[in-house]
Every structure is written in structure tokens, then in C-alpha cells.
Image: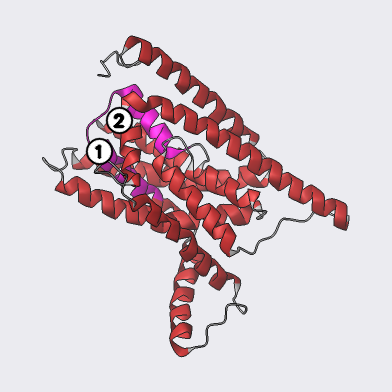
Amino acid sequence: MTILDAIIQGVVQGLTEFLPVSSSGHLTITQHILGVTEDNLFFSVMLHIGTLVAVIAFYHKLIWRLIKEFISIIGDILTGKFKWKEMSDDRRMVIMLIIGLLPLVLLFIPIPGTDMKVKDLADVFTGGNYFYIVGISLIVTSILLLIGSIRSRGEVAMRHAKEGKVEAARTALTVPDAIVVGITQCFAAVFPGLSRSGSTLSAGQIRGLNKQTALDYTFILGTPAIVAAALLESKEALEAPGGISIEILPIIVGMIVAAVVGYLSIVLFKWLLKTDKMIIFILYTAIVGIGVLVISFIEMQTGVNFFTHVSLA
């Protein structure tokens, strides 16, 4: 892998990790175009760590408050002072983050008849022979964003009719909200092209959450998930036969680029969501998804990569 390849993939990762267009899907597309196949999984994990730095930098004040609140919760539980009905906003967020992460256990369920777990399907679907999965998943992302957007606007319109003024949807997370968003995150982890931020944001909006609350929750929820995935996949990559063959410099360059671009993407996404410009992502994911499906159909007929002309066999 060259430095230029690393920069390109770092930019793609930084832009797509937080924008609702699927980082895994776009990395798969980019690698498919470039013909990059070696150590894709490990390099993708490293790029995710770069974007993890971005979200921590952006939300550092909130994350620090949540860490302190988590410690306080443990103290209250041990002393018998914890009360479910008397929680501050930060305390409720911590509890809902814990609940939202529980569905990740589903990723480690063994698949009958194979030696794989559910999470291993992500590796399978990123292969050239399953390129069409990316297209289908991107179209599903577009549909979810559309439904979430309609649901969010419907909530505002309903409150406007009832109260005579525009009022945001609810900001208080509930247990069902956390479970639905958590399960949605599991699906996004398996299917490249199904945007984690887009699908979980839409899940929150469909549940009736304020769009900014849903967005903040999905970004913070993704932080421990990225950390866990990075640790797990890094361990697997290090234990794999032959170890890691990618040079250190491309990895470092890719991570730095992903972090910088990722931070700017968070700023951009929050602004676009606030100004109701989600139609940009709805149309984009639909168009790219259809394009990938068309290319996949051509590749199935020819048996070679559309861009590199290398055999897919």
C-alpha cells in the first residue's frame, strides 16, 4: 500500500465514518477501485481508531462528564443511593449507553454449520464476490434516512398543530430507544454499506427522539464499540499467519488523515442535520447504491473487476 492509497482511504474513512453514507461501504468501494486486498481488515480498524480520536476530541467535555457520572453511579449502587426515577440527563445517558451496547453480544453468536460468528460475516461481505451487498446496504441506508427524516418532521408538525408552535421531539432516552438503536448498530457492523451513524440516527428519530439527541447518542455509542472492535480485530490480525504486512508509515498517515477529516465531518453533519439538509445523503446513498449494483451485475457477467480488470475468481 502506498502513502497515496493511505491518504485516499483516510479521507474516505474520515468523511464517511460520521456522515450517514457508511464508512465500511465506501472503504470497500475505494479498495475495490484501487484493487487493494492485503490486510484490509487491519488497516480499516486503524482508520477507525483515527476517527475515534476525532469523536473524542469533539465530544471530550461530554465524554469526561459521562466518565465521572459512571463512577458516581457505581458509588451510589454500592451505597444503596441509586434511584432510577431520580436521574440527571448525564446519568440517564450513561445508563442508556450501557443498555445500547448490550446488543453487541449478538455479534458473537456462532453461525450454525460454520466456524464463524455473526461478526465474521462483515469480512465475507467485503470480498469482491459480494460487492452487490454494499449496493443493497447503501439503498437500505437511503430508505432508513428517508423514513427517519419523515418521522422527525412529522413529530414537529404534530406538536406544532397541538401547541401552536414548533417544538423539538423528546430528548429523554428510554430503554426501548437504547435497545432499538443498539440492535441497529449490530446490523450496521455486519453489512458494509449500511451506515452506522445513518441507521442509528434514523432508528432514534423513528423512535421519536430529537434529531440532535439521536445524533449525539449514536456518536457517543459508537465510541466504546469502535474501541472494542479495534482491540479484537487487532488481536486477530496480529495472531494471523504472517502477521501484519502493511508498512507502519501508511498506517500512521491514514490514521492522521482520518482523524482530521473525521472531526470536520462531525461539524458538517451536525450543521446539515440542524438545517434539514438530509436530502443530500438520502439521494447520495441511493445513487451510489444503484451504481454499485449496476457495476456488480457487470462484474458477475464478465468475472473481472470493473476497474482493475483483475479476475474475481
- Residue 56 can be seen, yes or no: no
Q: Are marks 1 and 2 in contact (CB under 8 Å)?
A: yes
Task: State which region is magenta.
Answer: 22-51
Percent position of residue 294, x then y: 47, 17
Query: Who's the residue at 20% across and 45% down the image?
Result: 237
Query: Who's the residue at 61% across and 57% down the image?
Result: 213
- Residue 152 can be seen, yes or no: yes
Q: Which mark is residue 261?
A: none
Q: Which sits in the foreground, 85 or 149? A: 85
Percent position of residue 222, x then y: 45, 54
Residue that protrudes farthest toward the front in the picture:
113
Tag 2 secondary structure: helix
Q: Locate residue 8 relative to residue 1 in the image: left or right.
A: right
* Dot 2 alpha-carbon crowd within 10 angstroms: few under 14, some 14 to 19, many 20 or more: some
Residue 20 covered by magenta stretch:
no
Q: Can you identify the residue that label 1 sits on? A: 250
Give amino acid for label 1.
Pro
Task: Tell me the quadrant of the picture where the C terminus can be found.
Answer: top left
Residue 27 covered by magenta stretch:
yes
Mark 1–mark 2 Cα distance, whole angstroms, equals 8 Å
Q: Locate residue 146 relative to residue 23 in the image: left or right.
A: right
Percent position of residue 166, x then y: 81, 53
Q: Which mark is residue 5?
A: 2
Query: Who's the residue at 40% across and 48% down the image?
Result: 51
Residue that protrudes farthest toward the bottom in the picture:
79
Q: Which sits in the foreground, 104 or 287? A: 104
* Dot 1 alpha-carbon crowd within 10 angstroms: few under 14, some 14 to 19, many 20 or more: some
Give amino acid for label 2.
Asp
